[in-house]
Amino acid sequence: MLRRPGRILVNDIPLNEKAYLAAEERPSLIDFDVEVQEGYLWVQGDNRSSSADSRVHLGDPGGGLVPVDEVVGKVFAVVWPLPHMSLLERPATFDSVG
């Protein structure tokens, strides 16, 4: 995953994050370039400007990657704020990942 001027790229394909980022939120204020190893995930919060997600842990052991075995749930909906309530679909960008 790589952040390029305001966009997150997955296998060089820009990720469309409009479904879950607030209109005023930018994908990241932190520059990063990460290769996610098999069996791990890279996670980012929807409130990017105040989220202690994988980007904040780049310098920690594991580089911010989360082992898949430690994941206990899957995001499937936006429930707050209420006007944004919706079900989420898997972004087509991830079709290149499998």
Image (spheres, rainbow, N blue to C red):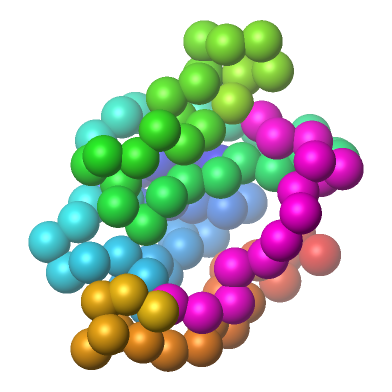
**Quarter occupied by residue 36:** top right
Tell whether position 25 is magenta: no
Magenta extent: 65-78
Please tell me which residue lies in front, 9 or 70.
70
Residue at x 51% of width, y 79% of height:
77
Residue at x 17% of width, y 69% of height:
23
- In the picture, measured across the screen, residue 76 lies left or right of residue 71, that is left
**Quarter occupied by residue 25:** bottom left
Residue 87: image location, x then y, percent? 51, 88
Residue at x 36% of width, y 87% of height:
85
Of the 4 image quadrants, the one containing the C terminus is: bottom right
Total marks in image: 0
Residue 72: image location, x then y, percent? 76, 54
Of the 4 image quadrants, the one containing the N terminus is: top right
**Quarter occupied by residue 63:** top right
Q: Is residue 53 above or below residue 81?
A: above
Please tell me which residue lies in front, 11 or 54.
54
